[in-house]
Structure formats: structure tokens, C-alpha cells
Amino acid sequence: MSAADVEIAGVGIHPFGRFDAKSVTEMGVAAVRASMAEAGVGRGGFQAAFCGTAYGGVAAGHKVLDALGMTGMPIFDVEAGCASGAAALILAADAIRAGQHDTALVYGIEKMPRGIIRSSFFEPWREEAGLAATPAYFALRAQRLMHESGVTLDHLAQVVVKNRRHGVENPAAMFRRAVSAEEVLASRVVCEPLRLWMLCSPNEGAAAVVLRRSAGRSGRPVKVVAAVLRSHLPGNVLSEATPMSGRVDDSIPPPTTLAARAAYETAGLGPSDLDVVECQDTDAARELLSYEELGLCPRGDAGKTVEDGATEMDGRLPVNPSGGLLSKGEPLGASALGQVVELTLQLRGDAGPRQVQGARTGLAHTVGRGANASVVLLNR
């Protein structure tokens, strides 16, 4: 059975932002209910559940389904940093392909503390020495991109302007006001060259997807044609695994490239087949680096790609029509499934004012602590 035999039956999302009066369980319940309603399934309508979360705590996924009175089936809680939701989806899709289940519920939930993303991944001494603070190695990575690909501060600002403009039309986004490049560059320096508005905000939210085995139903459902997770190879410098140390060896492909190559091969597609992309923009430089690592542009052309408007809504390949993490913020466990929700709407033609016209094939990409990188390809 091929990957094309898994389709998306329903999607749901709880907006990303700050919701002090709500628990992470309540947000998860909202997203799950919405996805199940769209899929037309109720109690007994799915045989397994997969929950992605990094900060949710023990059995966080169980608590969501317990609140709905729907426990009893296997519930898998999955943590893979920023790729947690994608990892949960991959496990669910594989289980359906293997014939273990006909229908599976996948959801991602998160309620993160304000401020810089912290993680038990790093040894305490690294945090105390300032070697694990995310803006520090994000900034080093940005500086390297500027040195090697000719990316400028203006290019970084353009990424923020683009994504914030896209986010205006997304009711699930945390920030829905367009900004100018001047405003971005005038925001305070966090770690050179990154300004405050060039960094996404850790926040709260939930997203859910119901997957099922394709059965030749009428219409043209959105199918999961590839879903891949890869980790870093030893020596990959400035990755999420080795923030400020390690050998510089450009011959070692980063995990995003490993995941993209495997996904393209599985689906029999390439970057030129894509109509829309949702990619990791934890910071503005991360989005530009993703262009190169995903093969969306030749190495060294990331700055030129955004400068030419290729990734705008009316460009050759719109990137982050949802507004990306720079508009939505990033609740780690929910962010990857939030991308899948957005692409599903885009491929159905249901994205409203932010619709990418004629979109048939989409790519969702996340990369985060571990380092874990995921690429999910959807097709209609």
C-alpha cells in the first residue's frame, strides 16, 4: 500500500496566541472536536490517537481525550521538539498504511512559558554559560547565511514583512497587523543581526487532523503522499543539536535536506512540483536557510529569492501564506500540524482571502531541537 492511500478526513485548529484562562487540555479539546466534526467521526470513529507535545507533561494527549470521554484506544504521546506534531502524524500515517487502523486522530498541543524557548535537551552548564540561548545560535546561523549567501539585513526584514502581511488574513494567527521593513529594522537588537521582530514568539495553541485510509470516495481528498522525519548527522554545525560548537563541514547535509530528499523520492515529486509551502521561520534567517535546504532555490540564492518576490502570494512559489510562525507564534507541539491544517485548506481551495490560486501540491516543513526535521507532502 502506498503513501497515497492515506487522506485527510478533517482538520481543526485552536488559534495560536496567549490564552491565560485556558488549559492546554481545553485548547486540545477545541481542536480535536473541530477536526472530528469535519471528518464526521465520533466515539469509536478512530482506532488510535497520536498527540505531539513538548511542554504538555505526562500523558497530555490522554487528558485531552479523557475530557471528551473518548479514551480506551491506544494513545501515543510523541515529543520531537518543533517537529512533534509532524512526528505524531508520521506514526499515524504509517499505522494506517500498515493496515493497523482505518482511521487515526492526530493532534498537537502546547502551552509554553513566555520568553526564550528553554529545553531540557541542553546540559545545565550550557544554559548557564549562555551557549544554549536560542537567539545566540540563531544569530550565528544568520551571520553564516549572510556571509555565504549574500543575505542582507534588508532581506531578513523582507521575510518578516511578507509573513506578517500574510498573517493579517489568518484568524488563527497571534499577530494580525502588517509591518514595514523600517519598523522591523527599528525593533531592538536581540542578538546581532536579529531584531526582536525577526524572531517568532513562543506561545499556546492546538491543531488536529483526522487521517483515514483512502477508499475511493467521491471528490478529490487531500492525500498524504509523503511524511518523513530525519535527525542530524554528526558534525552538522550550527544545527539545533550543536548550537555553538562542532566541526564546520559543508559536506554534511542538514536534517532538513535529508528529510526533503526522502520525501521527494517517496512521493515522486520535486521542488518544481510544489504550489505552496509552509516552512519553519522560527527566525527570519531560518526561513531563508530553509529555501536552500529544501531545494526551493539554489544554494546562495535565498536572498535573491525573497528579493524577487518569488515567495510572495502572487509569486512563483508562495511560502507561509498562513503568516508562518512570525505571525502565528510557535506552540511547539502544535506548530507542525498547524502547517498541515493550513495546507489542507489551501489544497481544498478553502483558505479564503489568503488562498493560493490553483494550489494542488503543498509542502510542510519543521525543524527543531534534537535536531529533528520533518517534511510532509500533501497532494490533491
Image (cartoon, rainbow, N blue to C red):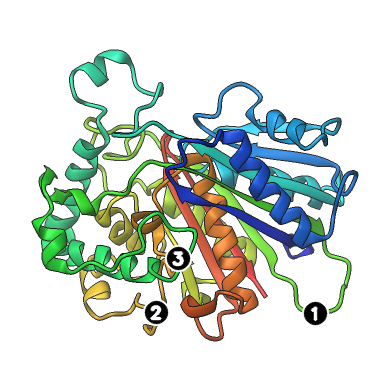
Tell me the amino acid under the disc marked 3: Ser
Q: Secondary structure at mark 1?
A: loop
| Left or right for 33, reference 315 | right
Please say if the residues under marks 3 and 1 sit with CB atoms less than 8 Å apart.
Answer: no
Nearest the eye: 289 or 28: 28
Q: Quarter of the image for the C terminus: give it.
A: bottom right
x and y percentages locating residue 296 in the rendered image? 39, 69
Instruction: Tell me the distance, in whole angstroms, between the alpha carbons under discs 3 and 1.
Output: 25 Å
Dot 2: within a 10 Å radius of its alpha carbon, few (fewer than 14), some, or many (20 or more) residues? many
- At horizontal 24% and vertical 30% (from top left) the residue drawn is 133
The residue indicated by pointer 3 is 322
* Front: mark 3 or 1: 3
Q: Earlier in the sequence, mark 2 or mark 1?
A: 1
What residue lies at 55% left-to-right and 69% top-to-bottom? 362
Q: Position of residue 100 (x, y in %)?
A: 86, 43
Q: Position of residue 275 (x, y in %)?
A: 50, 77
Residue at the front extreme of this rendering: 21
Q: Secondary structure at mark 3?
A: loop
For mark 1, does the 10 Å Cα neighbourhood hold few (<14), some (14 to 19), or many (20 or more) residues? few
Q: Amino acid at mark 2?
A: Met
Viewed as shown, does residue 100 lie left or right of 251?
A: right
Instruction: Tell me which amino acid carries mark 1.
Output: Gly
Q: Callout 3: 10 Å neighbours few (<14), some, many (20+)?
A: many
Q: Residue at x 86, y 50 (%)?
A: 42
Q: Secondary structure at mark 2?
A: loop
Q: Position of residue 121 (x, y in %)?
A: 40, 24
Q: Check the image and report above or below for 188 versus 68.
A: below
N-terminal-most mark, 3 or 1:
1
Alpha carbon separation for disc pair 2 and 1? 26 Å
The residue tagged 1 is: 219
| 126 relative to 319, above or below | above
Q: Which residue is mark 2?
A: 313
